[in-house]
Every structure is written in C-alpha cells, then in structure tokens.
Amino acid sequence: MTKILFLCHGNICRSPMAEFILKDLVRHAGLERRFEIASAATSREEIGNDMYPPAKRCLRAHGVPFSPRAARQVTPRDYDDWDLLIIMDDLNRRNLNRIIPDDPEGKVHTLLSYTGHDAVIPDPWYTDDFESAYRDILRGCKALFEAVT
C-alpha cells in the first residue's frame, strides 16, 4: 500500500483539494485498496476546521467528490507513518522543517516536482484563484499517480 500525505499551510484549501483529487483518480482507476491518502497542515491556525467553502465549490464544479473533514497538524510520527509527504510551496517546507527537521528517506516532495517543474502552487486563500490552484493540483496529482503506479 502506498501512503500519501498532502501538506499545506492550514489544511483547508490546497492539501484537502489534492487529497480528494487524488482519491478520485485512484477510485476511477479501481485502485483504492492500493492507496491511503490524507492531508494535514504545517500550522495550527485552522485545526478542527472543515475545508474552506470556495475549495469545496471548486471541487464540486469539477465533479470531484469530497467529505466533511477536520484540519489537523502534521506530527513527527507522520514521517514514519507515510511513504510520501507532498507539500505545495516553500513556506510549507520551512514549517515542516520545524516539525520534522530531517528527511533521511527522501519522502518530502513538492507536488509539481512530479510534473518535472519544481514550481509552487500559490495559496488560493490569499490569491482567491481556486481555479488555477485546481488546475495545478490536478496536473500534479496526475503526474504523482503515474509515478507511483
């Protein structure tokens, strides 16, 4: 089983969008039993909160199913429990380094690095551009899925 944990700042926009997008890709491929997919925050700001409503609207508009969830913060134990920790930007990396200072197994990657471009996905909480975030996340998730299957 491949275990993938998506990370972003608050775990209410990009990382849960990536979680549900990848779950949808896996479901369409009939490979649910081969994956465990979840998401977490690198900060404590949104702990307990569900996905941000504009992120939900964006997923709904693209036919991506999602369920209620509560944001949580990544922990040092997550490094041992997950095969891949997928971040969205450099701030996520800095915050993650405070929680998990070392990556001896090379588990931490930016999502878009799977596309061959180690670019960041801007936070739609600030940009209010959920469509661009969706397109980037979908592109990254498709490339990640291809890399792990």
Image (cartoon, rainbow, N blue to C red):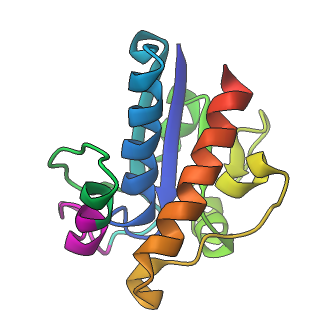
Q: Is residue 145 left or right of residue 124?
A: right
Q: Nearer the viewer, residue 32 or 101?
A: 32
Quadrant, the C terminus: top right
The magenta stretch is 45-57
Q: How many marks?
A: 0
To which quarter of the image does residue 98 belong?
Answer: bottom right
Q: Is residue 88 magenta?
A: no
Residue farthest left in this picture: 68
Residue 53 lies in the magenta stretch: yes
* 4 or 80, nearer to the observer: 4
Toward the viewer: 87 or 81? 87
**Identity of the residue drawn at 58% across and 44% down:** 141
Residue 52 in picture, x, y percent from top left: 24, 70
Look at 28% across and 60% down and name the residue there: 61
User: Would residue 84 be found to the left or right of residue 53 on screen?
Assistant: right
Give the image location of residue 110, x and y in percent: 69, 55
